[in-house]
Image (cartoon, rainbow, N blue to C red):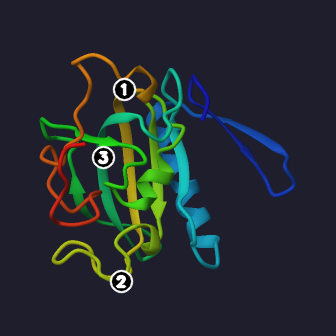
Amino acid sequence: VRPNNYSTFYDDHRQNWSIMFESEKAAVDFSKQVCIAKCNSSPALDSVLCQDLLLGEGQGVEGGDSLEVAYTGWLFQNNGLGQVFDSNVNKDKLLRLKLGSGKVIKGWEEGMLGMKKGGRRFLIIPPAWAYGAQGVAGRVPPDSTLVFEVEVRRVKLSKECSGSDGLSVSSRDSPAPSPVPSSDGFSSD
């Protein structure tokens, strides 16, 4: 993903292909389809598939950084996006989380590394990196592959942890289950 609605891709011979889209939405939609195609063409999904949709600005996030995130989660069904099982996009509160604290599913911990403020990313997460064989009663069937579109709205880098304006990490801003691994949620860090 590049500025001005460009995307650059590499084929299996490492040849570089650039495509310019007529709108940001067309570029984003195409990028999502590329990620879904990657998932459908892999024999077994054993790690998180990430596709940047918008790059964002500033420093990439790493473990220990606190984020405020808008997200939508879908079940991966019939080789594509299935039903939405959770979203905070049209809600007042963003999800607050601290990367590396183990308070969200492993696929988020892995898939959000390197994101920047204002960045959007598409994640396809295999069951072992999500809710596994237990699923989440009434929302996520056992052994479900999940798809998330995540957008980082605010970042507090762990290296600048002083001051009282820091983000608190709390699940009260988002209903369980996603991306909180247990339906109990978690307490503040």
- According to the picture, the residue beneath numbered tag 3 turns out to be 71
Three-letter amino acid code at the position of disc 2: Ala
Q: Nearer the viewer, mark 1 or mark 3?
A: 1
Q: Earlier in the sequence, mark 2 or mark 3?
A: 3
Instruction: Examine the rendered structure and indicate whether residue 14 appears above or below residue 67.
Output: below
Q: Position of residue 100 (x, y in %)?
A: 43, 48
The residue at the point 84 percent across, 49 percent down is 14
Three-letter amino acid code at the position of disc 3: Tyr
- According to the picture, the residue beneath numbered tag 1 turns out to be 156
Q: Position of residue 20 (x, y in %)?
A: 63, 32
Q: Earlier in the sequence, mark 1 or mark 2?
A: 2
Callout 3 secondary element: strand
Callout 1 secondary element: strand
3D distance between C-alphas at marks 2 and 3: 23 Å
Q: Are marks 1 and 2 in contact (CB under 8 Å)?
A: no
- According to the picture, the residue beneath numbered tag 2 turns out to be 133
Looking at the image, residue 104 sits to the left or right of residue 61; the answer is: left
- Label tally: 3
Q: Nearer the viewer, mark 1 or mark 2?
A: 1
